[in-house]
Image (cartoon, grey):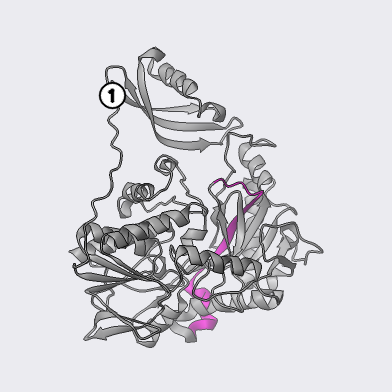
Amino acid sequence: MIKEIEIALLPEQVNIYNSLEKAVAQAIRIPREKINFISILKRSIDARKAKVLIRLKVKVYTLESHPTEEISSENKYKYVQNADPIIIVGSGPAGLFAALRLLELGLKPIIIERGKDIHLRKYDIADLNREQKVNPDSNYCFGEGGAGTYSDGKLYTRSTKRGDLNDILQKLVSHGASCDILIDAHPHIGTDKLPSIISNIRETIINHGGEFYFERKIVDFLIKDSNIKGVIDQSGSIYEGKSVILATGHSARDIYELLNSKEILIEAKPFALGIRIEHPQQIIDSIQYHSKSRGQFLPAATYQLVTQVEGKGVFSFCMCPGGIIVPAATEEGQIVVNGMSNSRRNSPYANAGMVVSVELSDLQAYQSHGALAGLKFQEDIEKAAFNVSGNGQIAPAQRMTDFINSKVSANLNSSSYVPGLVSASVHEILPSFIAKRLQQAFVVFDDKMKGYLTQEANIVGVESRTSSPVRIPRNPETLQHIQIKNLYPCGEGAGYAGGIISSALDGVAVAEKIRK
């Protein structure tokens, strides 16, 4: 007999096979000795009540049956050195997974990345944190793996109808990710684990005849009769291909400006902007797990918050339990913050973006910038944050309770943010419609999570790169740009995704359209 069932165990029972076997035997009403094997299919935490439970979906094999679980074999990539070349600009999730799918389809991916490979990129990120030196082409946003490499590797998505989610997860596992991502309800990899996975994907691409070029910033397109033929980098080198996948991420502002200058259609789109909030992890644990200590069997607690204030959405974004805040600026004279966690999520801090929806109607003062209105709005706020701090990547901050009361903090809480914080009024940086809605939302969120509104939390500015403020319009059937043939805008930077998995799925979809 083979049977799938759902059971709930205490956290301390989950990793003890005897406890799992006993619970399964009771659930299906057979003696324990008749169970041959138990396979965990899904795992999630249920903290809705005082007693926290781990919910499992398992497949049970009794003695007369045997496990036939299909272990994912290596994907059948083709050797494509002499196949039709497809240019991919950008090596984030969209670009990398487009490349892997192209290999399967027998097409040759040529990836061109403005930043450095994953190993050298680490040194620039270290300089950014310790010396506060911003390399505009190699930082938390740019470089091999894209921005997702340094934001925890969160793999949860609601975009399950956009493609084969399991295929993406299996590819990550085959390149070194833990098999846990196949069963966890909210899987993550961890910033410490992602670099080796990214480099393994690069090796797969190169070993099958694809090409990879680093430190090649694209500065122009080769277009003839509304048909893109290739791209040109800063040295004048030309890369030609049958098609061009534009997968540059949400922070490649120079690409938007290039498209705009060449009168290639782009359009402004809504996005979100706000701050990053940092609590002691113990506070979040105690709220979510209803206990002063989570113990050794539960992971650092997470949260997701959303509300409406005066018709505008206010919501948490990229929550990093047991994480740190990092400087995510891509140019000097900016302050941008983001969050990340390592695989163990063992930092004593929890942080999350807390942002307000920005609609096109909020950008009236930027109308003269046309499709770049949101981009210029972002830039001005990032520059304002820099001007308030006035010192490298030191970020302006307030205690949460002082932010609520529009008061500059006499001192700040300790923080994970390595460059350091300076006490300042975040209200002077954010437009009033954002700051006021955040103030009201924090009161609402404290009703949902008692103890969330506390003087022990810091508000850190600014969280401005939640998504692209620009969309590169494409035909919904062919996924080509609606104006330029064989140009395929893709992923977050094109305005069609919002995270690692949705970007990867979009990359796969584009690759399949190119093959057709």
In this rendered view, identify the residue nearer to me: 472 or 167.
167
Vertical arrangement, residue 201 with respect to residue 87, above or below: above
The residue most toward the right is 410
Q: Is residue 476 located in the magenta-colored stretch of the structure?
A: no
Residue 306 visible, this angle: no
- Report the quarter where the C terminus lies: bottom left
For mark 1, give the secondary structure: loop
Question: Residue 113 falls in which quadrant of the image?
Answer: bottom left
Please give left or right for residue 259 compared with residue 375 in the image: left
Q: Position of residue 257 (x, y in %)?
A: 43, 83
- Answer with left or right where residue 203 lies relative to residue 12: left
* Three-letter residue code for mark 1: His
Q: Quadrant of the N terminus?
A: top left
Q: Nearer the viewer, residue 473 or 325?
A: 325
The answer, for residue 280, to whether it is visible in the render is yes
Q: Residues within 10 Å of mark 1 (few under 14, many from 20)?
A: few
At 70% from the left edge and 65% from the top edge, which residue is drawn?
420
Tell me what residue is drawn at x 24 percent, y 80 percent.
229
In this picture, residue 433 sits left or right of residue 399: left
Say if 397 sits above or below 374 in the image. above
- The image quadrant that residue 491 belongs to is bottom left
Please say whether residue 355 is one of the residues in the magenta stretch: yes
Q: What span is in magenta? A: 344-367
Image location of residue 251, percent across then percent down = 48, 72
Q: Where does label 1 land, which residue?
A: 66
